[in-house]
Image (cartoon, rainbow, N blue to C red):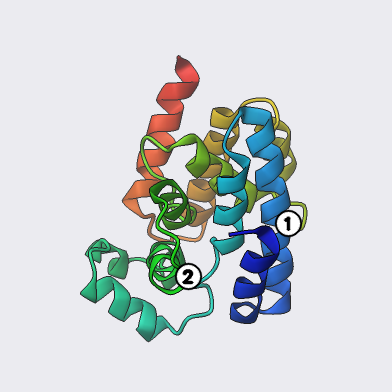
Amino acid sequence: MERDEALAVVKPKLKQERYDHTVRVMETSIQLAQTYGVDEKKAEIAAIFHDYAKYRPIEEMRRWIQTTYLPKDLLHYHHELWHGPVGAKLVEREVGIHDREILESIHYHTTGRSHMTPLDKVIFLADYIEPGRKFPGLSDVRDAAWMDLNHGCWMAAKNTIQFLMSKNQPIYPETFNAYNALTKANKN
């Protein structure tokens, strides 16, 4: 699927602000892919579809989690996490993208996971650092992202965990798994 066709599929599913974010994530993903030797086309498509399910009704996303292979423990965490896993499922069914790497990077862009693939890392990090984002600690992550993909992802996971802890929010175990795996990778 070419970029213009993919963007035309996604645009009606998103509010304008989220569509603009998606375009920035796409551009950032392509730059990260070029920097780290990741398949640019897969990064482009995964980035375009990463928020495909963002505005689906909560009950619809809950139903997808309950009735498919998706991890049921997601239901015990904030519904903001659900659009990644549900989005991967919907992109496969509704758009016809079956590439496992692309679908997994969409699935895990909200949580990360242990043993993230290079494409997972590109989408996870691009979503975090795209130029429209503004929050404390972001400039350090942006600087790290262009020097070392693992270190940039580690900083993003660490900041996410610290932010959620400061808000007394539960943290999905895959985010801890991502943080732990990236911590070990950074030490090697």
Task: Choose mark 2 or mark 1, whichever is in front.
Answer: 2
In which quarter of the view is residue 64 placed? Answer: bottom left
The quadrant where residue 148 appears: top right
Tally of marks: 2
Task: Classify mark 2: residues with Cα within 10 Å, few (<14), some (14-19) or many (20+).
Answer: some
Residue 61 position (above or below residue 154) = below
Going by the image, does 66 lie left or right of 11?
left
Q: Secondary structure at mark 1?
A: helix
Q: Amino acid at mark 2?
A: Val
Q: Residue at x 43, y 46 (%)?
A: 101
| Front-lying residue, 133 or 85 | 85
For image coordinates 67% across by 54% down, the residue present is: 25
In the picture shown, does residue 59 fall above or below 67?
below
Label pair 2/1, CB-CB below 8 angstroms? no
Q: Position of residue 11 (x, y in %)?
A: 66, 75
- Looking at the image, the residue that sits furthest to the front is 1
Label 1 amino acid?
Arg
The residue where tag 1 is placed is: 24
Picture coordinates of residue 139, whole percent (x, y): 75, 41
Label 1 Cα crowd, 10 Å radius (few <14 / some 14-19 / many 20+): many
Quadrant that contains the C terminus: top left
Q: Which type of secondary structure does the marked residue at label 2 adopt?
A: helix
Asked if one can make out residue 68 in the rendered structure from this viewpoint, the answer is: yes
Disc 2 from disc 1: Cα separation: 21 Å
Residue 125 left/right relative to 99: right
Q: Which residue is mark 2?
A: 95
- Residue placed at 49% from the left, 53% from the top? 109
Decide if residue 135 is in sight here.
no
Q: Nearer the viewer, residue 5 or 21?
A: 5
